[in-house]
């Protein structure tokens, strides 16, 4: 082996082992490079670069705006994968020109995801359909605006905002549109517990389940009831249900601020909050629940799952007021459900929370669509 070994001769300054084996390419002229490039293309004579849109007898042409024009998809899976790769909106028109596998025109999509698609809808629909379409969009936008305002305001300001009947109607119309998209309705989860367990516990709590239904003598308070679905289901069966909200949607609802309801102390057996802990000072509503509940009676809370980033912390927050956690779990992919029992022997709610209430129960803000 030479003196330099595998690292080269150290006496030869400025050279490395890599330089030893590298070959310096002779300079090439510009014409020679172009010739070499042309040779590479000639080897791939059948390859075409760029979007190909029309095929006929082996020929193809390009169109930068639409690379599927005139070429039908073999199946729905191919169309779905193509739109995903090209970032084409879900409801965009079919790139094949609206032709199906048999050459028949495909029906236009019902939704709109862009300005061009909305123009296409206006061309096809009559005036009434177009008007209804935009009314629905406007209702959803109004709901998002009001929803954001409610989650970021104290309950006194929310009461002022929703005191106006038209504003309250706008909010609940948007809420109804939203709830129709959920496979599970929160009030159905509540009703199932009250009518299938003798103590009103959530049915999923199998360890403490007692099949049956709650006694008809029990008094129920539905805080932030909306259109009082619980009262509409239970009152015909002989139950006493006090439904409170900021506006009366029907005869079952009593207008009241749910932080100060017109009920006597220790007069309620079950207190329900179903998606109604919304204001920045929602903890005042939990203090009111403690006041009206009888000792060893039930507090039921159902909330959107995304609002509770730390389920245990929320449970500890409520327990610190004067309750003990009996059960909590997720309901499907949408909600989280809690059962709390009021402590016996504690006369007033502890108003010194362990955590910041706004950190353990965050706002539920709907995305713009």
Image (cartoon, grey):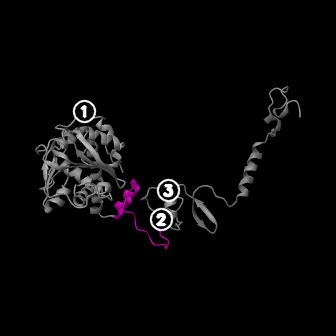
**What residue do we see at 57% from left, 64% from top?**
54
Q: Which mark is residue 84?
A: 3
Visible residue check, residue 215: yes
Select label 3 or label 1 by which is in front: 1
Q: Tell me where residue 235 sits by quadrant.
A: bottom left
Residue 309 in picture, x, y percent from top left: 36, 43
Q: Residues within 10 Å of mark 1 (few under 14, many from 20)?
A: few
Please tell me which residue lies in front, 60 or 263: 263
Residue 172 in picture, x, y percent from top left: 22, 52
Select label 3 or label 2 by which is in front: 3
Magenta residues, start to end: 98-124
Q: Tell me where residue 61 sits by quadrant.
A: bottom right
Q: Which residue position holds label 1?
A: 352
Q: Residues within 10 Å of mark 2 (few under 14, many from 20)?
A: some
Residue 36 in picture, x, y percent from top left: 75, 49
Q: Tell me where residue 312 sits by quadrant.
A: top left
**What residue do we see at 12% from left, 50% from top?**
254
At mark 1, the secondary structure is: loop
Q: Does the magenta portion include 329? A: no
Q: Which residue position holds label 2?
A: 97
At mark 3, the secondary structure is: helix
Q: Earlier in the sequence, mark 1 or mark 2?
A: 2
At mark 2, the secondary structure is: loop
Q: Earlier in the sequence, mark 3 or mark 2?
A: 3
């Amino acid at each position: 082996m030479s003196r330099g070994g595998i690292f080269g001769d150290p006496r030869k300054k400025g050279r490395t082992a890599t330089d030893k084996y590298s070959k310096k390419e002779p300079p090439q002229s510009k014409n020679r490079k172009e010739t070499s490039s042309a040779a590479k293309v000639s080897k791939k004579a059948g390859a075409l670069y760029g979007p190909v849109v029309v095929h006929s007898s082996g020929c193809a042409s390009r169109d930068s705006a639409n690379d599927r024009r005139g070429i039908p998809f073999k199946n729905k899976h191919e169309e779905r994968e193509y739109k995903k790769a090209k970032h084409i909106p879900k409801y965009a028109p079919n790139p094949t020109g609206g032709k199906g596998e048999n050459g028949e025109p495909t029906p236009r999509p019902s939704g709109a995801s862009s300005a061009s698609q909305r123009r296409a809808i206006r061309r096809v629909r009559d005036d009434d359909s177009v008007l209804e379409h935009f009314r629905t969009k406007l209702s959803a936008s109004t709901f998002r605006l009001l929803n954001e305002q409610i989650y970021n305001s104290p309950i006194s300001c929310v009461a002022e905002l929703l005191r106006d009947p038209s504003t309250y109607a706008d909010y609940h119309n948007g809420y109804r549109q939203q709830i129709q998209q959920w496979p599970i309705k929160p009030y159905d989860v509540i009703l199932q517990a009250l009518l299938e367990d003798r103590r009103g516990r959530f049915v999923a709590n199998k360890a403490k389940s007692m099949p049956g239904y709650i006694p008809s003598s029990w008094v129920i308070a539905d805080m932030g009831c909306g259109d009082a679905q619980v009262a509409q289901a239970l009152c015909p069966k002989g139950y006493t249900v006090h439904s409170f909200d900021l506006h009366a949607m029907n005869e079952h609802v009593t207008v009241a601020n749910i932080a100060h309801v017109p009920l006597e102390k220790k007069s309620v057996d079950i207190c329900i909050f179903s998606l109604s802990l919304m204001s920045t000072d929602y903890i005042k509503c939990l203090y009111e629940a403690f006041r009206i509940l009888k000792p060893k009676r039930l507090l039921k809370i159902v909330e959107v799952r995304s609002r509770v980033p730390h389920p245990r912390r929320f449970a500890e927050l409520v327990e610190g007021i004067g309750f003990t956690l009996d059960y909590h779990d997720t309901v499907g992919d949408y909600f989280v459900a809690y059962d709390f029992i009021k402590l016996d022997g504690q006369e007033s709610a502890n108003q010194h929370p362990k955590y910041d209430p706004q950190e353990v129960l965050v706002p539920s803000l709907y995305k713009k669509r």
